[in-house]
Image (tube, coloured by chain):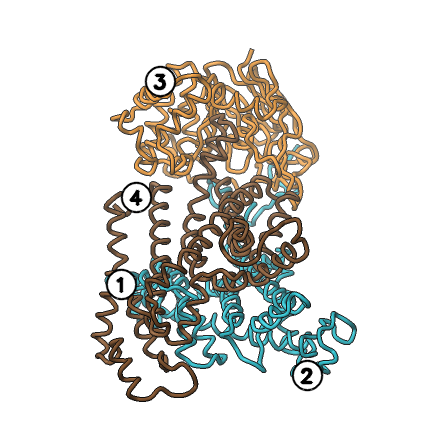
Amino acid sequence: MSTPAPKPAASGASLPLSPSTAFEPGGAGAAIRQSNLWKDAWYRYIRNRAALVAGAVFVAVLLYCIIWPIVSPYDPNDVEFADARQGPSLAHPLGTDNFGRDLLTRTALGGRISIGIGFAATFVILAIGVAYGSISGLAGGHLDNGMMRFLDALYGLPYLPFAIITLAILGEATFWAMVIALSIATWFTTARIVRGQIITLKQNDYVRAAGTLGARWHRVLLRHLLPNTLGVLVIAVFLELPGVILGEAFLSFIGLGIGPPDASWGSMAQEGYETYRVFPLLIIIPSVAIATLILCANFIADGLRDALDPRTRET
Amino acid sequence: MALLSVRDLRTHFFTRAGVVRAVDGVSFDVEERRVLGIVGESGCGKTVTALSIMGLIPKPPARIVSGEVQFGGRDLTKLSERELEDVRGSQIAMIFQDPMTSLNPTLTIGTQITETIRRHFDVSKEEARKRAVGLLEEVQIPRAATRLDDYPHRLSGGQRQRVMIAIALSCEPELLIADEPTTALDVTIQAQILDLLEELREAHGTAMILITHDMGVVAETADDVIVMYAGQVVEQASALDLFDNPEHPYTEALLGALPQLEGDGIRQRRLTAIPGRPPDLLDPPEACRFAARCKYAGGDACTTHMPELRELRPGHFVRSEHPASERTRRGETVVV
Amino acid sequence: MTGFILRRLLWTIPVILLVILFTFVLMRQIEGNPFRRSERSVPESIQQNLERKYGLDRPWYVQYAKVVKGVFTFDLGPSLVLRNRDVNDIVRTHFPPSLELGALAMTFALVFGIPLGMLSALKANTIFDYSAMFISNVGFAVPSFLVSTLLIYFFALQWGEWTGLPTSGWDSWESKVLPTIALGLGPMAYFARLTRGTMLETLQQDYIRTARAKGLRWRRVVVVHTLRNSLIPVVTAAGPILGFLITGSFIVEQIFAIPGIGAYYVTAVTARDYSVVMGLTVLLALVVIIANLVVDILYGVLDPRTRDARA
């Protein structure tokens, strides 16, 4: 005689302790495991090889730029004409420049400035963008409309020309002058994205619930809306970074950037350009550095986007 | 001679996590002018079966591993892509579940109908357009001629599904595969669409495979039914026989889960749920795949080997060691 | 549809006014004197004369009005630094090369980028795809000054004899080849990546499955159904890129010695040549605005859903 009780003997089948929901198209299921968004995203990110490598390289470059000048045996401004224009060697892994200065050290220093300006400008862009976008998105109605129209108009401002004018206003091209010049005409897209995100979130029930419970608008903004926008913002950082770094390189290349003795990758490239016919290495190295950083930032942005929103992943 | 004959079809998905055996040994026939209902829960493989017939499974991860699909004297699984393109649309047509996304939003309705006609028939643009108007009228879309130049976003869900039907029937196919055609629609529209399908089928003499998870739809529309579970056919019978005398425990459970408006003891009955979940098709058990959720499973038989699909009565097949007619009231299994 | 176009055109006017205002205000913030040629200061009387001559002694709103009027009558006034030259004059001689370079680079980017992206999508995850995307990523990341320099280095210096491509000037069609590639490589890579992405997404859509189920030939499915829908985001991106190409071509112009407005702009700003800067900035802004306008219109043509929404 067979017993009527079910036996969970087959592999691959799950059996919860109690009868679950009625038969439904989604398949009777156990409770969904609550998982942390960030932890999940982290795991997804790591599985993306390109993003992982890019992230590692990015961090490596950052560390190099920060640490190497401190431990380097060379003084970056040490002029030594006898050693000028050497190719890579054990003594000088990246070679030397027109003045005999060690390139490995100068590139690291240049990186400090280029990446520094890059991040600073990006954060300024984000700050303005978030402020503008949140106000517009939260306010809604006529204010939102007006602000967006104004933004549309601002799109007409050509990026580089205004950067040039701004630099001229601020006089000499100090670090912060560059930061301002590079952020002033390019925060519009971020503002748009933030506004879009806020509007979408505003519709969410839990936000409305907070509102009906009497929460004030700034509390709603800080506690509910911004944390959810965080993901978008992190991605935005790595999307804006390449543009800013390239912008800085361009400005420096045409001579408007950081002046000597400080050097950024852009101004190093300009020095290299003057002698590229005889010594191309000098322009190649900073350009490759810039390209590497931009490539990494792109892959990181892609990886983050996939990690934070798995629906966009290609199967 | 059946119109369509599927024999031991196996379609597997080769993923990084392993091989998903989505369709694992499915066989059935579709006769001319008749309706075969394929019923089962999400993930049981009914859509993959339909797509395998049409050759529309995504080729990189998926592949028809074995089996045959006999249609018009040929095995569709052995045809080249070009040959399949000739069969699709003109001899076998398919309509899909979500009318909102199944039409191209940047092309007019007219274009989407006429391109099908002109692909399979050598007619002029004007002739194709005329036929398109006729088709729209057949599916009862008012002011058909002007509608031809509309874009899909101007139509409601029900109307779009009608357009899909019009497109599917435009080349007079012998077989129409309808994959959950009413699932995404309002209940009232569902009835209209099903009626429409019935009318057109009769008028054009088209056979149909109707895929659904809704037993009510099957009861109304199908002549023959197969019940699928975890990539396999677990019961196969005429519709009448299935509903009067369900044999497989799964089928019984499906029918038992239906809300009923009348009958004895109606107030005391709760909706009976089927506990558990279908097995993971990455690593299906060697045994009966329903065993874990089956009320009657027991002993070694159910849990160690896969039951065969056997003919319990003429025309009624079951894949179970405990079909209803072999059970006594005390739940014992006695072979009649 | 025409209503849509007209409204967008009208909208450009306030934008231009805004640009003029911004530029005007910003320029006035820059310290400095357009009339100072060297380190020595200009004698007071001469300074005042010059200011009066160019109207710089009038109150700011009068100057502003004059500028606005000038812009809308296409009379941008004389250059403050270069005697005997009108801003209009400068624009006439130097703008066309920049415009042409930008247009050529854009064409290059589209003609090579879109098919590359399309093929990559159709052959996703094959060697072709991986190599094409690798090249795209590199092409996108490498700054244009390096590309220009490398192009010159190889094509002109090393292989100069048998390619015969000049590296400066903008007269013969040969001279336009290298700068076009230099400027267009980045955007080409961008379009390739973008097209690949959108095509992959489009290919997943339900309506592509429907198209195949109808028995349409694969080529038709790709071209008529997939490509059209994939191009929409590409078109959207193309506008700002065109604007950027024309307004940001300074470096390529400098390296290839192309007589465009790029170099002019920088020197004008440095020399505080207000009228030239104003004229050029407004011009560049106009280019950006028109590029965006064209994109908006094209978007309406390609995606019928937006036409109704905007109507």
Which chain, by letter, is orange?
B
Disc 3 chain ID:
B
Can marks 1 and 3 be said to lie on one chain?
no
Q: Quadrant of residue A191?
A: bottom left
Q: Which residue in the protein does label 2 denote?
A: A79
Residue drawn 29% across the image and 62% down it: C16
Alpha carbon of mark 4 to alpha carbon of mark 3: how far?
30 Å
Q: In screen coordinates, is C22 left or right of B336? A: left
Q: Are marks 2 and 4 in contact (CB under 8 Å)?
A: no
- In the rendered structure, the residue with mark 2 lies on which chain? A
Depth check, mark 4 against mark 1: the one in front is 1
Assess disc 1: are there few (<14), some (14-19) or many (≥20) residues with their C-alpha within 10 Å of its C-alpha: some
**Which residue does the numbered mark 4 point to in the structure image?**
C307
Q: Nearer the viewer, residue B42 or B333?
A: B42
Residue B61 versus residue A87 in the image, above or below: above
Of the chain colours in the picture, the one used for chain C is: brown
